[in-house]
Amino acid sequence: MFKVGICGTIGSGKSTVCHIFEDMGIPVYFADDRAKMLMCSSTGLMQQICEAFGRECYKDGVLDRRYLASQIFGDDSKRLLLNSIVHPAVCRDFVLWAERQKAAYVIVESAILFESGLDKVVDKTVAVVVPEQIALERAAARDGVDIEAVRARMAVQMSAEQLVSKVDYTIENITLESAKAQVESIDRRIRDEIS
């Protein structure tokens, strides 16, 4: 199965772009959602999290996100430890999911495509980008926070320029109409490549 990874900064509209692909019949794996699901359903992953951060991570089998966040907040080594447990599980889950799909190709959406290692299991990569001010305003409105809070979250992610330098395709998602046209162009190029 041919696999495409989609990444982008906060507020770039990765989900919107992925929904356009879905409307065209392309299955999309949303890595963040699946990671949350796996952390609550995969006994192996739950065991590893407990071993690393304590049994308090789960209450009656349910992940205590607030407790886990308190364990890693401000501690890069603990955050990296959690990532080293969760990211490989998500990569394995994505590959298994992809093999079950019946489309021309599949997509994995991840804000941290390169940091998580998902870029190693895909054939092509796409960055969704917008000017920083638009990204700040979109994310602040979506999350109900101020622009400075979004700016702080952006500071720990790869910049749009860094992403663009790493990917095969770029979508500038300023308007829905232009995003659709760019998605259709990339879809044609991918289909040409795999046919």
Image (cartoon, rainbow, N blue to C red):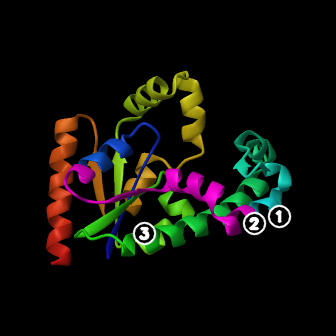
Q: Disc 2 residue type?
A: Gln
Pointer 1 with pointer 2, Cβ within 8 A: yes
Q: Secondary structure at mark 1?
A: helix
Residue behind mark 3? 97
Q: Which mark is residue 51?
A: 1
User: Where residue 82 appears, x then y in whole percent?
Assistant: 71, 58
Point out the image quarter for the N terminus. Answer: bottom left
| Predominant SS of the magenta segment | helix
Q: Disc 1 residue type?
A: Glu
Magenta highlight range: 21-46
> In the image, is residue 90 above or below residue 194?
above
- Closer to us: 97 or 168: 97
Q: Which mark is residue 21?
A: none
Q: Secondary structure at mark 3?
A: helix
Q: Examine the image and state in which quarter residue 115 appears.
A: bottom right
- Closer to us: 27 or 149: 27
